[in-house]
Image (cartoon, rainbow, N blue to C red):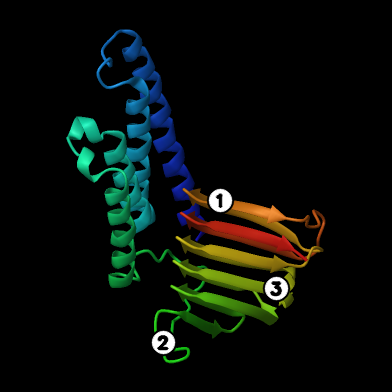
Amino acid sequence: MYKVEFESKKRRKIMWGILLLLAAAALVVDKMGYLKEIGVWTVIFSVCLIVFFIDGFFRRSFSEILFAAAFFVIVNDELLGLEKITPWPVLGAAFLGSLGLRMLFPKFGRKPKLMNVSMNGKQLNGKTMVSEETWNGNSVSYDNAFGETVKYLSGEISHINADNAFGSLKIYFSDAVLRDGSADVNLDSTFGSMVFYVPAEWKVEINAETAFGSTKEQGKCSPDGTNVLKIRGDVSFGSLVIVYV
């Protein structure tokens, strides 16, 4: 897990380093008069979107791939002669395309987990692809798609794997006990929201990557807390909110 995370950060640094160099080159070339018809900002935005597009392949994120392509078309619609499909048709196509691909290939976007936890295909209320919960010792996996799910953790835990797509997943940690005073959360949220309700006396370390998404905290945690919750993963076109209670 940590090797994968290190390689991901290294790859992103390389890609954004190349982006900055290309942006610098675009500014110089524009001043020389070679980008009058295109525009320097169009070039810079296009390069940024290409970086997101490539990053989407490495992160195995359908939404990041398709929306980066859609915004690239919007930015360059006149150059590509595609004004008729921008902006809403191409954005709608990206949304429906990412939705369909996620349904057809649900395992494609799964990243290496902190532990090997097998999903047992459990159905809730007779519906599949809505909410799934699997325990393996002190490790729990939550899988939520196209619905709203609320989970209440209790007992001793060490690892939490949380996948959320086109839905809302809320997890309450109030009654949980962190094994050896520490637990790891590995999350993947696409087109949805995650809300974690965490005791304020805990220390929370957030190291989640975002692509057209956001992470924020409500309230304050204890910087010297003996219990440490480490949050890693990806948030794409959605939000992660940590609420301290």
Q: Position of residue 80 (x, y in %)?
A: 19, 34
- In the picture shown, does residue 95 fall above or below 24? below
Cβ atoms under marks 3 and 2 closer than 8 Å: no
Q: Position of residue 37 (x, y in %)?
A: 24, 18
Residue in the picture at 59% in, 84% down: 137
Mark 3 or 2 closer to N-term?
2
Q: Position of residue 15 (x, y in %)?
A: 39, 37
Furthest-left residue in view?
81
- In the picture shown, does residue 125 fall above or below 168? below
Residue in the picture at 47% in, 89% down: 124
Quadrant into which the C terminus falls: bottom right
Q: Look at label 2 and name its amino acid.
A: Lys
Q: Position of residue 91 (x, y in %)?
A: 32, 50
- Residue occupied by mark 3: 173
- Residue occupied by mark 2: 127
Mark 1 or 2 closer to N-term?
2
Q: For numbered disc 2, what is the local secondary structure?
A: loop
The image quarter in which residue 186 lies: bottom right
Q: Look at label 3 and name its amino acid.
A: Phe
Position of 186 with respect to 182 (left or right) is left
Instruction: Say which of 42 and 225 sits in front.
Output: 42
| Mark 2 closeness class: few <14, some 14–19, many ≥20 residues within 10 Å | few
| Mark 1 closeness class: few <14, some 14–19, many ≥20 residues within 10 Å | some
